[in-house]
Amino acid sequence: MAAGIHAGSRGEKTRHLPTCATCHNTAHAVKSHRDPVSPTHRSQIHETCARCHADPKVIAEEQITRPRAVALFVQSIHGQAILQKGNLTAATCTDCHGAHEIRRAADPASGVFKQNVAVTCKQCHDDVASQFQDSVHGRAVSHGVFAAPTCTDCHGEHGITATRAPGSRVAPLTVSKTCAACHEAVRVVEEFGLAPRRAGTFFESFHGLAARGGSPVVANCASCHGTHNIQPSSDPRSTVNPMNLSRTCGQCHRGAGIQLASARIHVAPGFGEHPWVTLVRQIYLVIIFVTIGGMSLHNGLDFLVHLRERWRTEGQQEDEPRVPPEVARRLFERLTLNERIQHVTLFATFTILVITGFALKFPDAWWARPLVWIESGYAVRAWLHRIAGVLMTLAAGYHLAYLFGTQRGRAQFRLMQPCRRDVGEAWEMVTFNLGLRPHRPRFHRFTYVEKLEYWAVMWGTVVMAGTGFIMCLQTIVLKRWPLLVIDLASVVHYYEAWLATLAVLVWHFYSVIFRPDIYPMSQVWLTGKITGEQMAKDHAAELEETLAAETVLSSLPGDKKAEPRVSI
């Protein structure tokens, strides 16, 4: 004890340093350390140490740097083993710090000096400590490289918990953050020549996003690199050595390890990714900017024109078709019940896909936190997304059958096909909104706005379904094709999702919600009906054709007359 930290400077009256009696009791009350009531019995040692190390006065005056050491120990896996399970072989204070010759952690002779920590832990954890000592971290520490981690850097010091406990620093959900503390530190990366952005690229990967979202089963740093036996990738023993990658990846992706072994794993936009992936991303960014920008400009001009017309007080405008009051009040069928059900199905599945898809991509976002909290893991968002994707795909298949298997569907499809007239009407609409024409174009059944939207939905459904299935069935895909296929599918799926979401918000929602003459919402998707007044404005040419057809029917001989039925 004379060489320990407790023996120093006893001549100072203000020091609170323990003597033999402090721990063992007075001379006539000393009991064997094997006696359960002895202050030095293994079940009591933490309480004995707490007399000083949990006393606020002693902590303040002696400037003890670990004021919660005893409290953390009591909550630790070691403390719980002793206190709750009665396991007296579990480590206690003296096993790590020593009993009499307790030294500071900075003292090379201390059992908790960084170079000695693994040896101290090895007293109980022989196998894993031996693996650590032979690892890249263990060898670095033994050579005096104290920036490298030892046991306590990853597991903690006094508050060590079970490896799968929620608060553990090495639990599946947190171990990657523990690794990032060093591998994202600029000083450590630069000083030791470590590969940069390893942790950052992991957290942006499929595995990292799942871990951030709370998945306890997805691969983390330790799943691939090992735990105590981490070796440089150039070492043949390393689990990420090129010769071993196939087996390492195959633990989760059975049969796909060969393809993964030949691919770069830690990549990010602009950092090590395949040139094709970068090219596709850049193309999509241009498409999104041009498309959404053009839509916004188009709708912005249209919005201003509608506001101008709404502010006028002189009644019906010259540019609006004049229709008799009885026609203006009539309701014309726009969507059948079958078509409305298809629309609602599309709306519901698309909404679920958007919410769950972006919640998977941005699990830390404030709006995604309730969903992440409810599921307590990764499964709910993923399965909701997949189920909605399958339902949308089935709905698309039904729609195709409806288009080509029914008379109305075939008629609708013919009218929905793009034609030269659409280009002319689009130009006429733009020039009208710019004030260069006095009248709106007279649209038929489907306007260029509706056609653009319809074919965008068709294209988007095919792209999203195709790339979605590739991502969902990645193990099957990797048995035949390289990882590049999944990387391309991922980037296309992500940016197509942005394009579709923004297009719906900017293009479709404007037409059915935010357009001043429609606001607060068009009821067509619910009722299937459109008024003659609205039809005269949006589909003037179709209204004329419909009324002309009714006139012809009414002029037929009596026995051939039929009640006119408008089916639009």
Image (cartoon, grey):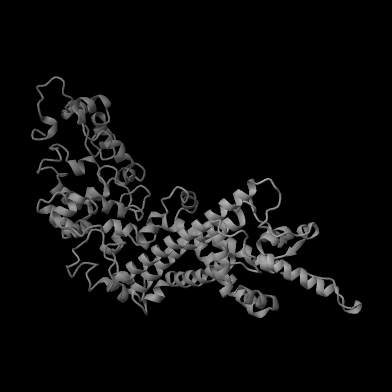
Q: Nearer the viewer, residue 347 or 423?
A: 423
Q: Which quadrant would residue 190 be assigned to in this image? A: bottom left
**Farthest residue toward the right?**
558
Q: Is residue 379 visible?
A: no
Left/right of residue 25 with respect to residue 500 in the rendered view: left
Dividing the picture into quadrants, the one containing residue 328 is bottom right
Residue 58: where, in percent of width, then height? 23, 26
Quarter of the picture holding the N terminus:
top left
Of 45 and 127, nearer the camera is: 127
Q: Residue at x 40, y 72 (%)?
A: 474
* Quarter in which the C terminus is drawn: bottom right
**Residue at the (28%, 63%) spot, across then down:** 266
Image coordinates for residue 529, horizontal then vertical, percent: 72, 61
How far across and down, in percent of the image, does residue 471 sit?
42, 69
1 and 417: which one is in front?
417
**From the viewer's perspective, is 551 left or right of 360?**
right
Q: What residue is shown at x 29% (from left), y 43% (from top)?
A: 159
* Residue at horizontal 46 percent and vertical 69 percent from the top: 468
- The image shows residue 275 at horizontal and vertical percentages of 29, 70
Q: In this picture, is 477 found above or below 122?
A: below
Residue 460 appears left or right of 163: right
Q: Please say whether residue 428 is visible from this viewpoint.
A: yes
- Is 101 left, or right, of 544 in this rendering? left
Q: How many marks?
A: 0
